[in-house]
Image (spheres, rainbow, N blue to C red):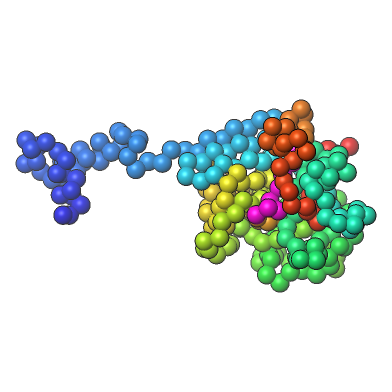
Amino acid sequence: MRALDRITSFFPVHLRGMPRAWLLMGSLLMLAGNPAVGTPQAAELKLQVLLPGLQWIEWTGMNNPDIHGLRIDPRRYRFMVMNFRNEGASAPLSLWDWMQRTRALAVFNAGQYYPDFSYMGLLVSGGRKIQGKLHGLFQALFLAEPLQEGAQLARILDLAEEEFDPERPGYLEVAQSFMLVDRWRNIRVRRTPNMAVRTVLAEETEGNLLVLLTQGPYTLWELAQEVRDGPFPILKAMSMDGGEEAQLCVRAGGFSYPSPVEAGTQGFSYSRALPTVIALFPRE
């Protein structure tokens, strides 16, 4: 049965003799008047101000797991890359230990690492190179705290488009990973069936930074689509890691994530220790 015949078959018998163009117009009007037919509902977004320039995000999609996280004004807050060896620890630390050690407002996992806990890509902490070589396949760099006055305080650099000298990074804090979405709105990951909870770092067009943690598993392609087409004006986005390493903790303005009930009696539900994290602090 042709599409038009399928549509007109739903009309009462006494209307089926009308010109088909009229019937088609009527059917389209019926569909337009019924939001439940073929029209996906918009995602729900809640923003909670924790401190000036710092917002908590609860992003509820219709077809994908929720996404929670932070919206950060880098003019009010600074990012610090922290590695366990650089901090004098003998082994990777749990997120609880990182929060206790740093007294940061928030801590989240910073990229990927090898079995010996060495970082996969360029890593700079406080101007000191922890891992000095660029990863050949990762094209995203998170840069914070520039040495040059007037430069953007925190940003994502795309190695596919921008020049970068790892010998002179020009920033005190650097962490490398892979691009999800570039400034042309291209998705920069392949389609695979691999699903995991994931952490994303995104830059908005006006300069705010987003730290996002999915509340359920995504493929990288689906996550890139969700971030690109979501409620924020995304300029670029990069993936930090997935699976058990995807972690975020917030303690700011009387707000806690995970909540004490979710975290359990020992402080956090996260079990995987992290060799490298990015911590957030207020600017003095």
Residue furthest front as drawn: 265
Left or right, 159 with respect to 63, comes to right
Percent position (x, y) of residue 274?
Answer: 78, 53
Q: Quadrant of the C terminus?
A: top right
Instruction: Note whether residue 243 is visible.
Output: yes
Which of 275/182 is in front?
275
Instruction: Note whether residue 183 is visible.
Output: no
Left or right, 216 with respect to 108, comes to left
Residue at (78, 52) in percent of width and height = 273
Percent position (x, y) of residue 66?
Answer: 56, 41
Left or right, 250 with respect to 214, comes to right
Chain part drawn in magenta:
243-250
Residue furthest right as drawn: 88
The relative height of residue 4 versus residue 17 in the rendered view (above or below) is below
Residue at (52, 61) in percent of width and height = 193
Residue 32 appears in which quarter of the rendering? top left
Residue 110 appears in which quarter of the rendering? bottom right
